[in-house]
Each structure stands twice: as C-alpha cells, then as structure tokens.
Image: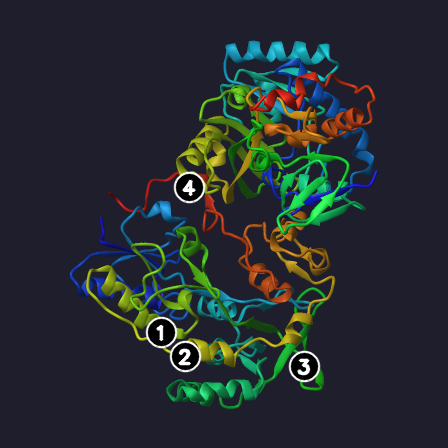
Amino acid sequence: MPDVAIVGAGPAGIAAARAVRECGKTAVVFDDNSCAGGQIWRGEDIPLQELRASTPVLGPWQLGCGRVILATGARELFLPFPGWTLPNVMGAGGLQALVKSGLPVRDKRIIIAGSGPLLLAVAVTLRKQGAQILFVAEQAPTRQLLRLARHPAKLLAGLRLRMELMGIPYRTGCWPVSAEGPDQLLAVTMRQGEETWTERCDYLACSFGLVPNLELPLLFGCQVRGGCVAVDEQQRTSVPNVFAAGEITGIGGVEKATAEGRVAGLNAAGKNAHNTPSAFPETLRHAFQLRQELKHLATRETIVCRCEDVPLSAIRSFDSWRAAKLQTRCGMGPCQGRICGPAIEFLCGWPADSVRPPAFPSTISGLLAEKLLDQ
Amino acid sequence: MRVVVVESGVIAGGATGSGMGHIVVMDDNPAEYALTLYSQQLWAELLPQLPAPVEYDPCGTLWVATDEEEMSGVHAKFASYTMRGVRADVLDARTVAELEPNLRDGLAGGLLVRDDSVIYAPCATAWFLRGIAVRNARVVEVSGDGVRLENGDLLHCGMVVCAAGAKTSELFPQLDVRPRKGHLAITDRYPGFVRHQLVELGYLKSAHGHSTESVAFNVQPRRTGQVLIGSSRQYGVESPAVDRPLLNQMLQRALQYMPRLADLSVIRTWTGFRPATPDNMPAIGSCPGRGNLYLATGHEGLGITTSLGTAHLLVDLIAHRTPRIDPAPFAPERLWRDG
C-alpha cells in the first residue's frame, strides 16, 4: 500500500509525487486521462512512474484512510450567450485539446474570446498549427489588466507570449455577443466599447476563466472558502491527512501549482515544509474579473443547462439553485452542473448546491468495485 | 377559507424531491388499500389537467416473483386486487421476459398492475400551489392562536395542518413519526431499458418491517430515459450522507434482478427521509385536546400516491362531511406518546 495517494496528474500532482519520492516514500497518482500532464501539459508525454492512468477517483471511499493529496485542477468557465451551443463554438482549452489530438485547423478562421491568460496560450497552439486567428478578445478592460504590472516576472512572460503572437490583435474590453448559425457556426457578433460588428469565422474558442474542480474535495468534507479549498501553509485542508495543491486552492497557474504540490508532497511524506503564499492568484482574479455586461448576454430562449435543455427563462423565477434544480432539472443531467453551475452562479448569484457522489459518472460495476488501493 | 403554506426550505424539498414519485395501489392491509386506491382514482381524475412538467407516465407496476413461493404471493395479490376492481394480470416467466427483456432469466413470473403510474412530484407540488400564498419560514411552535415562526412572528390562524413529513418530530417530539432514511441512484439516459415500475415481492417486507436496515429491488423508468434505482430503509440515522455499504447492498440487490444494470452509468446517488410510523399508517385528522391542530403526515414511502386521498379526507373531516373512506385507522391520537 503506497504511503500517499495523489489525485490528479497535472503540475501539482506531478510535483507532489516527485517530492514524496525524494523523501524515500511511495505514492500513487490517479488521473482520468491516459497520460500525465493535466490540461496545461496535455500531450507532452511526461513520464510519471507512479501514474495510474484512466482511473477517475469517484469518492473518498475508494482511497481508504491514508494520506491523500487532492490536485484535481480546474476547468473552463462557460457563460451562455445566443448561439453558444452551435457546433464549432467550444471552450478555448477545449479547442486546444482537440487540436493537440489532431483536429486540423490550418487556414481556418478562428476567434478566441472570453477571459484569462489561457486565451493567449491557446492562440499560440492554434497559430503553430496554421490557424488564421482573427483576434483574441479579452473581456477585461485594459486598466483592469494593468494590475498584472505588480508581478513583473509574470508580465514579462505575458509580453513574451504576446510577441510570439505578433500580428494577432489582442482586443481588450471586448466580448462576444452572439454566435450565428443556423446549423453550425458561420459568424460571431462582437462588442467593444460602443462598437458592435459581425465577423465570419469557422471556430469560436470561448471561455471566461477557470473554475476549480471541487467535487472530490467537497466529498471529502474539505472546507471551501471563496470558491477554493481552504489550506494552511503546509497545504493541509480542514480534513486530517488530506492535503490540497494547485488550482483548487486558487487559480494561479503552473508555478503556484508546482510549488504547492511540492510542499504538499513533502508534508505528506512526513517532512516539514511551508509554502509562502503569493499574491498572484488574487491579482489574477482582479485583473480578469468578469464584467457585468456578461450577465446580460443570454436571452430568455438561450439554453443555460445543455444536458437538460433548460432555457434561461425557466430558471429566472427561482431564488435558489435547489428550487431551480427540482422544478426544471437544470444541473441534474450527466454533467451534474459542472458546465452550467458556475455560469448560473455568475448569472443568478446562487451559490453552488452540495455535491453528491460519485464525483464522476460511473458504471454500477465501478461503484461496487473494491478500493483503488490495496490494503 | 384563506390558506397560507409555510415552508422552511424549498417547495417539495423534503421527501417529495428525493423520492420516486410512484403512484401505486398497495394491498398490504385494508386501510392502506383503501387510501391508495382512493388516491389513485383522484390522480386519474386530475390527469387531463396535469401540465407537461408533471410527466405523468402510466407505465404500470410489475411485481416480480423469483420462485414458486413468491408466485403464490402473486396469485394472492391478483385475487385481492381483482376483488377491489383494480386491473391486474398474472404473468408467466416468458411474458415477464417479453415485457422487460433486461430482467434476468429464471424468474418465476409476475403481476402487472396496469393503472399504476409515475409522476415528477416536485412539478406536481408547484402546480398544486399555484395561486396559494407560500411563506418561506420555519415554524417553531404551534399554539391555540396560530403558529410562531423562527423570527418571532406569530401567524394568527384558526386552524393548523401539520404536513411536515420527516420533520414532524422536530415540532412535535411526542408524536411517533420517525425519519426513515432511503437511498436512490439515477443513471444516464437509456430509453427503453426498463418500461414499467419494477418491484420485488419482498418490497413490502422491507417497507413494513422494523429491522434497522433493509433493501428491496425497486426500479423506475423516467421520461428522460434515465433509470431510477432504489430502495433502502434505515432507522435511527440522522446524517443525510450516502451510506456506502447500504448503497452497495441496494445496488447488488438490483443487479440480482437486472444484471445488465451493471454497465449503466450512474450519475448521482442521494438520500432522503421518509416519515414513518410504528403501524405504517399515516396520521390524518384532528388532534383531540390540541386545539385546532390537524395532521397530514407519516406517509412513509406512499406520500405521493396518497397525497390526494389524504387531502380530500382531511378536508372532509374539517368540514364535518362524511369522508369517502374510513378515517379511523389514520387517527392521529394513536401516535401521541404522552397519551
């Protein structure tokens, strides 16, 4: 039986595994993907001897009572707007993943929109594959983005990225208003300041930032603060023997994830290590804060819950998630609110409802299976 | 009469929102039979008015027998239903297999009760409440003047009906209504995988028994094509957390009847609390010596079915009309522990 169980083989999980190994202890890293790397290092063939690939962890019961490090990462935030469910409208990270898996985008006209540093990283990947990127549209206004100047190293990295993308306009204070079909994406209508215009394109890669994957931490009973797992400087959560690292403790990128993963790994392995929390996640949050106009893009007919086809008009009359769920089944489909939950929280102000097991859909055989760790 | 409904949580947020929404005639004893049959008829009368979100599905109940002993139970049930004018058919093993191909081989047969149905209860609840004042507050005390709310407000009223379900004992600790926890699991969409509400004959033993823990095979098709899997019963557990061993037991039981369930994807598991009484009968009626308090609670797993019968019975009692069924078995006074 390994000394430490790690959930998530992204940067934080990989760093944690290495730290545990350094201390002469054993770890196992579970991930539902077939390779290590998480989202940001997808397709980079990272060797990780402790990896148990294609093994999603459904709940605490599968891991027994040893030391656990949760590093389940983040997913994209989608906001509904007219046409957002058309074929070829997808998440920015989603399109990037498809392209890395072989989707051809050479000479395709692509708009990348939404919010966050991810948009630029996606632009780099798509550019490399020969896409014709019309522009990158960041909803945050320039003055808000200037807060990033507090972190010169990051700003420099950002500028370097910008230079790689020379020739691609980076429009700030700009966001999509609607996507037009009728059967698949043909054009996108954009807004910037007082201007509104429509642009023909083949793909719209659109997401509005990242949301921590809290399903498993919540099933463990970890305390959550401000939408993130609360941890101390040793990456301990409120649950004994359970640590958390990376995006789930605050969206902060690769360096934060790696640093926290390492500290969590060292502590889980019995060493004493401390992390100095950086102000970067907070700065990031302020710089890319979502503007109010985004709350008003969806019309009454716009679908907000894709699994159950629930339009905005159906949920508007309720005053809580639970009431809306019971009456409309919004959030009750296969994704269990993973896609619509954060959007509806933003649009309606409802805090997320409690999580129910399993953390991911599982066959009954999978639910009945023995623990993932041998005793 | 002017009515206000006081709800501390979300409308239909108790057992109504957690349960299966099965409308079923249960023949375990004459009182239960009378109430469920009366109620089912009332639901049938309401059918033309029920809006689409209620998702009324006349799928019927198929009681499943695994051996000859259970088959004689089927025949007894058939006789008792037929005597009361309830449409039922005894099915042999081959017919059961034709009607439900995903049930395992080697069953003995079954009983099909055609007029049982399934609804989506939360939407039915909202529909019943249309045009009725609902106050989102928690009642902490019931007195001769009315009800006192958590914030100190006193709602003056001439009559109080307590329909607090599993929370009844919070308000009236002396009333023998105890929460009985149940588990459910729901799958992704598999249209046609199951066509009727399927229930094992042993279900009644689980429902009417008093063991601390039991499971019974009970599976339901939903309009979405999702399969709803139950059932379990547990006394004395306050936590709503999913009890892994009991959930697994419930799922194993389901696999014994429908092995192909093993490969279906479960998207959610959850629990709910049924309001249970020692004699398995609900409490419907006035409470002598307690002013103008009426009870409509303690329905265990039959709350959705018997909601309409309960309502009509209660209104008849309040209006001093002769009710359509005998109210004596449901008299609340039998449940007051201080006499």
Q: Which residue is mark 4?
A: A367
Q: Write down the chain letter for disc 4.
A: A
Mark 1 or 2, nearer chain start: 1
Q: Position of residue B161 (x, y in %)?
A: 71, 34
Q: Which residue is mark 2?
A: A280
Residue at 55% in and 50% down: A334
Amino acid, disc 3: Arg
Mark 4 or 1, nearer chain start: 1
Q: Secondary structure at mark 3?
A: strand
Q: Position of residue A207 (x, y in %)?
A: 55, 71
Q: Position of residue A112 (x, y in %)?
A: 56, 77
Q: CA gap, disc 4 to disc 2?
A: 39 Å
When the figure is inspected, residue A65 is found, relative to residue B321, above or below; the finding is: below
Q: Which residue is mark 3?
A: A191
Q: Which mark is residue A256?
A: 1
Q: Are marks 4 and 2 on the same chain?
A: yes
Label 3 crowd (10 A; few <14 / some 14-19 / many >=20): some
Q: Nearer the viewer, residue A146 or B72?
A: A146
Amino acid, disc 4: Leu
**Mark 1 against mark 3, which lies toward the viewer?**
1
